[in-house]
Amino acid sequence: MKSYNFYAGPAILPEKVLKKAQQAVGNFADMNLSILEISHRSKQFTAVMEEAEELVRSLLNLSDEYAVLFLTGGASSQFYMSAMNLLNKKAAFLDTGTWSAKSIKEAQKFGEIDIVASGKDKAYTYIPKDFNLSPDHEYLHITSNNTIFGTQWHEFPDVDIPLVCDASSDIFSRPLDLSKFGMIYAGAQKNVGPAGTTLVIIRKEMLGKVDRQIPTMLDYNTHIEKKSSFNTPPVFPIYVCMLVFRWLRENGGLEAMEAHNKKKATILYDTLDSSELFYGVVDKADRSLMNVTFKIKDDSLNDAFNQLAEENGCIGVKGHRSVGGFRASIYNAMSVEGIEKLCEVIQNFEAKYA
Amino acid sequence: MKSYNFYAGPAILPEKVLKKAQQAVGNFADMNLSILEISHRSKQFTAVMEEAEELVRSLLNLSDEYAVLFLTGGASSQFYMSAMNLLNKKAAFLDTGTWSAKSIKEAQKFGEIDIVASGKDKAYTYIPKDFNLSPDHEYLHITSNNTIFGTQWHEFPDVDIPLVCDASSDIFSRPLDLSKFGMIYAGAQKNVGPAGTTLVIIRKEMLGKVDRQIPTMLDYNTHIEKKSSFNTPPVFPIYVCMLVFRWLRENGGLEAMEAHNKKKATILYDTLDSSELFYGVVDKADRSLMNVTFKIKDDSLNDAFNQLAEENGCIGVKGHRSVGGFRASIYNAMSVEGIEKLCEVIQNFEAKYA
């Protein structure tokens, strides 16, 4: 029996992607070599890089104004790298939880940061939408989905400055109108692929406007010019991302994925809402379709629920250590079947303990 | 027929490692999940990280004075990161070719760099060993093996300041006395594992001596404190490195690997030296045991030789685009059989054209 992986990340991947990835570790593209030992300058891998970029462009309807990069270091590296490349004097940040706070801390090393709104007053259980920008804010940084707290922006703020967005945990989960965004970045290991690469999509005109000296590897223009191959890129992680992009296209693209994700989240939230023992912790309007956070009214039952879930092959439902409770991460590759299994566990647990 | 991969990197990996890696992409550690979709905080992956570090420590006889880190971004990222963390005012650099030059360029963004010797006068076909250091040099940076030119330090310079060393293309190819080194770094994709992680070994007392503000992800201390898991590390690349370290230990460690590498290089250099058509391009004393660079006296024959090599399953012997000719990269995992095959091709070619 395959386990259902509800971990926040690295996350579940489609079966078809895993099969193909496994083949490539044996013999890639009839080269009689593993993909782990081929040159990143071979024509076979260059084709992978090109296809990966093309698929990102077509899935998101990207114009040539945007560059698509496969970097490393995770979203945590983009916290400082975005500010290093984009921030001259002042930017606005929205604080919607742990990852926002980290992005603010790193950006403060490069300029003045106005935290224009924060959800901290209610333990980040909602997305603050009332805020004022000033004309000298160069961009507005947001976190599109808050993995730890289980909140998500469903309508992105309508502002006159470019959005810079950490979309690590919900990119490719729904269609996106990129025109509002100056930059979007995402660690791969949730909705994009395995751990080891970081996707950066950036409007090229955002670049070249800061005076500071930037190390070659930290300058987005380096990677734009060299198509993410200035030095050896993480070959295998990028290959698996490309397989995920193919899988997304074959399954109807982002519209179909959004419908799939809404269906799954609705089943799970409905189960929680109809429970007398379990409850969702987040404002209904801001509930994440990716990370469903919930608690048990009597938290002395936490260990028992966790154990029952694991016995039923539902692993990784424990909440983040900083907030407790439970969290089911239900990214693109999670099946309706997996959600139904978890709901069954919830209902069985409730029948026993409520 | 498996091809013999003579590419400079990403390089050939041991068959046993590839088999085990392939299994893990299917089902890792009986978790009923692929290693590509497990949490980096799972106890199964924590065990991998610990074993990888322990194996590095035992292979290199490292004391607790040294930290062992698995980062990302390649050696190219260490060019600036080492200077950002270590360089206050002035350091000495030895210029032994392309990669040295890049490390110099990035370090110059953080302080004054004295290039104390350079092999540029003879197109980097030798290692310059005459140089003077001054008391205000904080460290001496060297490149232990020059992948493009095919030169290698066989005896490291005996100096009073710490060596900082890019050992991307020869780490683990021979025993190393670490006491001379303040820091060693290496992109994985030559002798350590697949592309996607970068090994950094650093003497902890080297750190904390610069005043500049360092982004969290670029501070070695961040990764020391969090055992390379401050954020999601490249799970699968690190796993494969761990398998390579196991393979090294099972095959007699670095002494045995050095003997194996000397044997292979001797066979190949002897073949070149006894040829009337081919010749090695580097000073004999500085010949690399990892990257054997050679040329054909009549270079109109280059394409024909390359074709014959490929027909015989010897791929990637073309020299780096900046120097031309040929290069056989014969890292740890290259078998004696692979070398003999290449020598056979050289001799057959010579019989036909000499």
Image: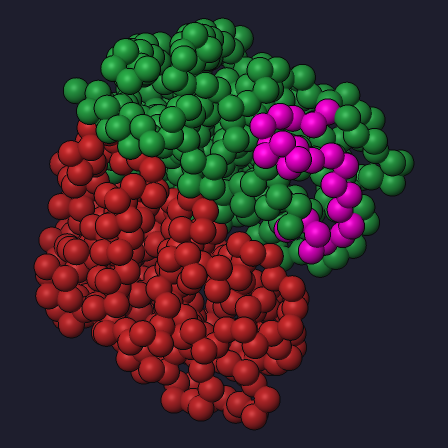
Chain colours: A red, B green
Q: Residue B268: in sight, yes or no?
A: no
Q: In this view, does B283 lie to the left or right of A63?
A: right
Tell me residue B40's x, y (percent).
40, 42
* Total tally of numbered discs in the picture: 0
Asked if residue B250 is positioned above or below residue A284 in the image, the reply reads above
Q: Which of A142 and A242 is in front in this view?
A: A242
Q: Give whichever of B93, A193 is nearer the camera.
A: B93
- From the viewer's side, name the closer residue of B54 and A345: B54
- Point out the stretch of residues depicted in magenta: B106-129
Q: What quarter of the picture does the C terminus of chain A occupy?
A: bottom left
- Residue shown at 48% from the left, 20% from the top: B280
Q: Is residue A128 above or below residue A58?
A: below
Residue B307 shown in magenta: no
Q: Classify A154 as above or below B245.
A: below
Residue A41 visible at all = yes
Q: Does the magenta stretch include residue B110?
A: yes
